[in-house]
Image: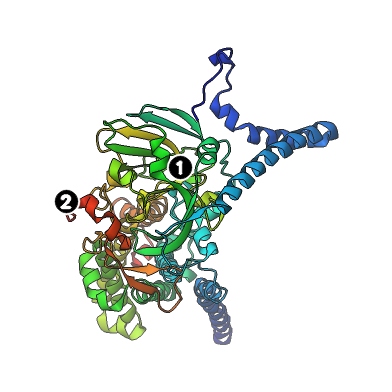
Amino acid sequence: MLIKQPLDIRPSDITDEKVYLSRRQFMRSTAAVVAAGAAPALLSQGVLARENASRQVWVRKIEAQIAAARKSPFSTSEEKTPFDDVLEYNNFYEFGTSKSDPYENSEQFEIQPWAIKVEGACHKPGTYHLEDLVKESQLEERIYRLRCVEAWSMVIPWVGIPLASLLKRFEPTMNAKYVAFETVVRPEQMPGQKSLFSSIDWPYREGLRIDEAMHPLTLAAVGLYGKILPNQNGAPIRLVVPWKYGFKSIKSIVAIRFVEEEPYTTWNNIAPNEYGFYANVNPKVDHPRWSQKSERRLPGGLFGPKRIETQMFNGYAEQVASLYSGMDLQANY
Amino acid sequence: MLYKGNLMAGNGDTVKLIRWWGFFLAGLLPFCFLLFQILTRGLGPDPGEAITRFNGLWSLITLLVCLAVTPLNRLLKWRWLVQHRRMIGLYAWFYAVLHVLSGFLLVLDVSIFLEEVVKRPYIAVGMMAFILMTLLAVTSPKAMVRRLGKKWKLLHKSIYVIGVLAVVHYFWLTRADYTQPVFYASILLVLLGIRLYWRYYKKRLGSEGAYRLY
């Protein structure tokens, strides 16, 4: 639903987003300062409790929807990676580069309220509240293989909205040849974005060709393992494009842009010889740093990682190969 | 007088022995920590990768400690440190051996060992450092020092090359955030820079010659 401001509110009356988003921090620090005085402390704790309650209501609502998610024929029957491993082993450089950093550093990340800016070649641009977008969608559970470009893989039961049905409500025009996505920038909550020696030009950006974005396999996930999407896995909404390397599945999305030209994508910009725009899983095209012929299926035992052959398009060739017919996949890696 | 001298020598030996054990156990600490992590399953779903990174990092740290011996001796007159440099160097090699073994047994595959070394420049650079280190480790016993004479000194100067290769290896395998390699590269830069400084600007002033040990 498009949010329209009533006319009687002047722009100067609107609280700046930054101020608005920092209100919890403000209340926390206020609570600490006035802790000596019982009455004001109780008052601010009351406000905090109400904030907490509203978030919990939201979590409950989404989880109720997640519980009612439809099973999907696209799901694999392979053994799932245990929940704890999915929570504690992530690449989410906004929270740090080590695999355990996202788990350790994402606790303070606030996912409510969450707005998504929709722009570009579409009939219904605007700022949308995630709550509204999810409320009106039928969620699906999709158990997908996730293949990281670093040659490890997992099997994860995602819950989300097929991206096509989400994008269609913004009514893209014929000029929408690509869709560009952007991750939130919040250095105060994302320590990785504060790093002085990072070559990433925040925000993290990714993009898909419109037919890839509209493909029935492409998912906008809001949950996993029957729960609301954990912060370290890209809360509150992320892409899951199962036939591409994991870095294409952008996390914590705040902007969607319909564009005519191939958009800027983060890894492709940092090292174009290592990360292509397409980044389709392809055992025949090696990454300069490692072979892509096989992968380590996680969790691995200590003496013997579960090494399995990597499949073309991560095993989704039947569904997606036609998207690339006639294309040289060695050149368009 | 002779008796007193012997007594002092005896005390000195005891102190040296205690220090030897101190260094020996300190060098084992990271390894014990790793064993503890393995036994308590604290390494996450990809233990091979975690073990490889851990050993690589500790090999680099120990190497930098080894390179700090000469400057510390010269600046703070810690002569006793020099007596234990061999052990520090051997520990750097010990962790490098574990690093290479875990990399190829637990992360990659032995069957693609050669292919990987040749194809991946960052592995090739690391391998070069490892081969040089092995050479230094093999020639570290006192008998070898005597046998090689002047050549030994020259050979063991390759520790500077190893330091540079190790840091290049770290930079090369890093993606996106260079905070860690920058940190270790800066330490290496200081440790090598101070030597250059002494060599070219303070040569005449350095009367003790202790710094020339390396």
From the top left corner, tell me how far across and down residue B34 is, in percent. Answer: 51, 72
- Three-letter residue code for mark 2: Met
Nearer the viewer's eye, disc 2 or disc 1? 2
User: Mark 1 or mark 2, which is nearer the start of the sequence?
Assistant: 1
Report the coloring of the rendering: rainbow
Q: Is residue B150 visible?
A: no
| Gap in angstroms between the C-alphas marked 2 and 1 | 36 Å
- Residue A322 is left or right of residue A105, and the answer is left
Q: Chain of mark 1?
A: A
From the top left corner, tell me how far across and down residue A297 is, in percent. Answer: 40, 69
Q: Choose top left, top right, bottom left or bottom right for residue A264.
A: top left
Q: Is B18 drawn above or below residue A224 in the view shown?
A: below
Q: Choose top left, top right, bottom left or bottom right for residue A12.
A: top right
Residue that label 2 marks: A327
Quick one: A152 or B82, which is closer to the camera?
A: A152
Number of numbered discs overlaid on the protein picture = 2
From the top left corner, tell me how far across and down residue A176 is, in percent. Answer: 29, 33
Outermost residue on the right side: it is A38
Residue that label 1 marks: A193
Q: Residue at x 35, y 73 (%)?
A: A307
Q: Chain of mark 2?
A: A
- Three-letter residue code for mark 1: Gln
From the top left corner, tell me how far across and down residue A213 is, in percent. Answer: 33, 44
Q: Residue at x 53, y 75 (%)?
A: B32
Q: Is A86 drawn above or below residue B89 in the view shown?
A: above
- Residue B158 is left or right of residue B53, and the answer is left
Q: Residue at x 37, y 71 (%)?
A: B107
Q: Secondary structure at mark 1?
A: helix
Q: Secondary structure at mark 2?
A: loop
